[in-house]
Amino acid sequence: MKLLHTSDWHLGRHLYGKRREAEFQAFLDWLLVTLKEQAIDVLVVAGDVFDTSTPSNQAQTQYYQFLTRVAATGCRHVVIIAGNHDSPSFINAPQQLLSSLAIHVIGQACADRHDEVLALKNAAGEVELIVCAVPYLRDRDIRTVQAGESVEDKAQKLIAGIQAHYDEVASLAVALRDALPQPVPIVATGHLFTAGGQLLKDDGVRDLYVGELGHFSAARFPSVFDYIALGHLHVPQKVAQQTHIRYCGSPIPMGFGEATHQKEVCIVEFHQAALHQVRTLPIPRFQALVQLQGDWSHIEQQLTELCRTGESVWVEVVYQDQLLMTDLRERIEAICAKSSVEVLRIQNLAMVQHTLKSNAITECLDALTPMDVFERCLASYEIPESQHLSLKSAFQEIWDQHRES
């Protein structure tokens, strides 16, 4: 049996104002072809299907059209969990309808944990795989708030709550497997930040909890899981160097920090109820992204060469020379005029330093996250450093509740 693990599609996401529907569609079309060519039996999407909790009509259309086309590939089951970017209620809304198509969606932690333990059947009607479909576990799902608790108390409760959740679904999965006439593999999903996970600048990954609260050690996952399909981090990686615990990463670069990284999906093969192998399959690049850094001479040369290729390229320019250049944007636009190269972002570091020194700091809200704004408020009001972590934790809870409402 073959399982394909993907995650963090972020349908509807823009890149510095540039719409990316064509990239997402190209990926989904490629994925449908891959499901068929690789003879995949089960597709697992480990969260962050959408980029926001209120996806656009175009993003919704791409999602549902993809799901209606999966059956034609021969893939028997699709398992989708919600991530921190997704709306639990939106993901769950068509649950009953999708289940008739063997598409299983879990938008939030279930009051009855049995609902997260899925018994997937083969063409003969026999259970061939058990999936513990654990979605992103929100703060309120895994702990109770008590007055006067410290940040350390909260951290311990978060970790304990996540572990208790996995222990419970693992126990139910084992009981289900033991009742079967023959053993089958047990797979778990998750949308969380494991301790030691690799991040990249500009990848758009949000802290699930403030600071390092909730960073979950791989050793805490129950040992009964034959494979753990994780989402949230955009860089493909093993967790704690263990082959069976993986982030597959996002399918397209979410920012220029990922421009040079090869994107991939994980294909997991089971033989006789045991994990046989995990291999990765590279995803084609559907839109070229390039980050140019250096002085003007280097940037001018590289940008000119890109324009000569005739290829559609989106570029971020990071000007790093000490020489102040006030007409940087105009020079760049002149080079790129009438070409297929589009410069989406220009960072003029020399100008930034000049501006900082002149104490005329101006920031664009589009470039700041809500937490960035809150941190600036803390600094502006000279709140003691000792109070920052607890205040940021409270703000994160309030902001999450606002996004979900």
Image: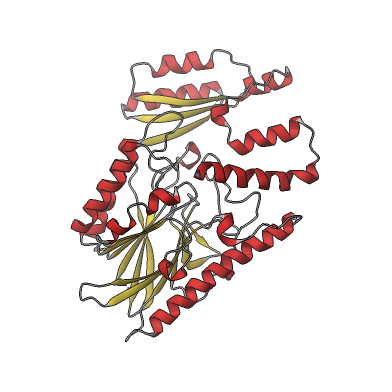
Front in this rendered view, residue 295 or 214: 214
Q: Is residue 102 left or right of residue 159?
A: left
Front in this rendered view, residue 328 or 146: 146
- The answer to which quarter of the image holds residue 149 is bottom right
Image quadrant where one finds the N terminus: bottom left
Q: Is residue 333 left or right of residue 129?
A: right
Q: Position of residue 48 (x, y in %)?
A: 44, 49
- The answer to which quarter of the image holds residue 374 is top right
Task: Report the residue at 21% width, 58% height from top.
Answer: 71
Q: Position of residue 203 (x, y in %)?
A: 51, 42
Q: Position of residue 179 (x, y in %)?
A: 37, 85
Q: Is residue 38 left or right of residue 147?
A: left
Q: Position of residue 397 (x, y in %)?
A: 61, 47
- The colour scheme used here is secondary structure
Task: Report the residue at 32% width, 53% height from top.
Answer: 94
Q: Is residue 229 left or right of residue 162?
A: left
Is the residue 299 above or below the residue 248 in the image? above
Task: Report the residue at 48% width, 65% height from top.
Answer: 111
Residue 34 makes an appearance in the image: yes
Residue 263 makes an appearance in the image: no
